[in-house]
Amino acid sequence: MQNISGEAGDPEVLMDNSLLVKSAIEDFEEKMVAKFVDEMALVYIIGAFSAGKSRLVRELLRSYNLAHLLPISSQDRQSALPLEITYSDKACLKQIDIKNTTEVELKEYPSRQAQKNYDSQRHCLRLEVPESALSLGDVSLISAEEGLKRLVMKDMPGWNSGDSFVSENPLTSGLVHDNNLSLVYVVRANGVDGQDDVDRLKAVFVAAEDGEAYFYNNVNVVVVVTRCDDVAEFEGIRTRVTEKMDRLVKEAELEDEFNLTVLCVDFGKESEKRDHSVFIADFWQAILKPIEADNGSSRGASASLAKQVAHWKPEWDIRSKLASSLQLLRAAKTSIEGFKKEGEFILHLNSTRLMGLSVEQKRKKIAVAWKKQAGEWQHSSEAVKSLTLAKDHPLALWWNEHYWLRGLSLKLQKVDRLFAKMEETVAAFPEKEVELQGFFTDKMEIAYVEARGSLFSSFYWVGEALENRLKGEGQDKVVATLLSLSIIDAKYSDYRNLFDVVEGKK
Ligand SMILES: Nc1nc2c(ncn2[C@@H]2O[C@H](COP(=O)(O)OP(=O)(O)O)[C@@H](O)[C@H]2O)c(=O)[nH]1
Ligand SMILES: [Mg+2]
């Protein structure tokens, strides 16, 4: 999955600032990614027993090395309970009691014998995998609910080829859901021309036409023809499947709302571990077709993340706090620039003009002249504190602790200290005759250079860059820019520190 930090496995050694920023961004992403809503898009995988349904699931998920959690695919009838496959960050297999909505985590895929102890109407297995194709982003399905949606594929127990379809209701007999994204029909190459599955398919199409089985945007059917061991036959098989489907669809009067993809594949022997990456990519694309338009630009983890950020509740809007932060930085800049003018800390005052005054009067006069030059400086701690984000804000760690306010308060504290030092120095202005400019240069120069250097560091330029770039921008862009700049800034300052250490400056 693509993420903003985008550098999992980066061989480069990360240093302090980078580690802080990186961990804070990961924390942010974790908080954002977890926002899946309950609404799901369903895709049933149907077909006769031994057509290759479970094998299809195994092949789709093979790269995750979860062999022990995957449905058993063999010549024997294996599946008794329906298996749901859906998205989660972490792989796991659960057995769900639909009625009680309870679930138990399983260590391995249960044998058919073990599955038989449970009623297939009431129980199902659910495999959760970090396959990004199963995470749909914030697409709109049937409700207007906002949030990330998951795709759920259901590997249904197969039927015996040749059995006629007796049940009147394809919904209760597990051929189609009442609310579908797409339907996957798996058939062996040598069964394509047979009549075995015709009644069931037709029942599905009729239910779709009636509206009993709802499909988002057209009835999208993906036919997976397995055991197609001769590439030369692909074209012919595709044509025959298409003609057959067209005929059934026409009989169900569904032809205007029908969308078909036929994929031919030979999975081969399991032990061969063939590469099916092209087939897999085609497969995901085919079942996601109904939400393609909605999806196009918004799919992918970072795109959906942007969409979520753009829809944050008003209390989470960081833009005004950001603007206040930048204002503080600007005030610090103005103060530092006024602090020393034309090379002097107390311009427009010299020893001659202090002659004849008592020490209190001298100090008072210096204080007034200095305030006039440098302006008022409010100690920064209260102002920074007021910019803290609430603990439940997804960016809280990044903003409050690891980067933004940390950087801001470090800079501002230097200015605080500089002003405090100046006040002390003025208050300690000596009774005896001293040359005014020389006295202040002596006492203040080092602190001043340090505060100035510290303020005008990479963090300051991040603020400057933001100021120019983010006027009137949406929050998603603001957050994305902030996070990317923080990565660059952290890296830069780490290298800078390292360089200083090597150069002996630290
Ligand atoms: N050679 C070959 N074997 C396949 C193919 N598809 C499925 N099989 C095998 O056919 C058997 C039945 O498949 P399975 O997935 O269990 O069928 P299901 O009943 O539809 O779930 C298993 O041994 C699979 O490995 C294929 O394309 N080529
Ligand atoms: Mg199976």
Image (spheres, rainbow, N blue to C red):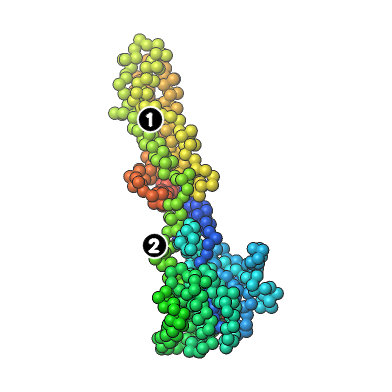
Residue pictured at 43% horizontal, 87% vertical = 240
The residue carrying mark 2 is 297
Q: Is mark 2 within 8 Å of ligand 1?
A: no
Mark 1: few/some/many CA within 10 Å (<14, 14-19, 20+): some
Which comes before the other along the chain, label 2 or label 1?
2
Report helix, strand or loop for mark 2. loop
The residue lying furthest to the right in this view is 117
The residue carrying mark 1 is 445
Q: Residue 480 location in percent, x, y? A: 41, 52
The residue lying furthest to the top in this view is 356
Q: Residue 8 location in percent, x, y? A: 48, 60
The residue lying furthest to the left in this view is 342
At label 1, which amino acid type do we have? Glu
Q: Quadrant of the C terminus?
A: top left
Report helix, strand or loop for mark 1. helix
Give the vertical position of 145 relative to 257 (above or below): above
Residue pictured at 49% horizontal, 60% vertical = 143
Mark 2: few/some/many CA within 10 Å (<14, 14-19, 20+): few
Q: Is mark 1 within 8 Å of ligand 1?
A: no
Q: Residue 274 location in percent, x, y? A: 49, 80
Q: Residue 9 location in percent, x, y? A: 48, 61
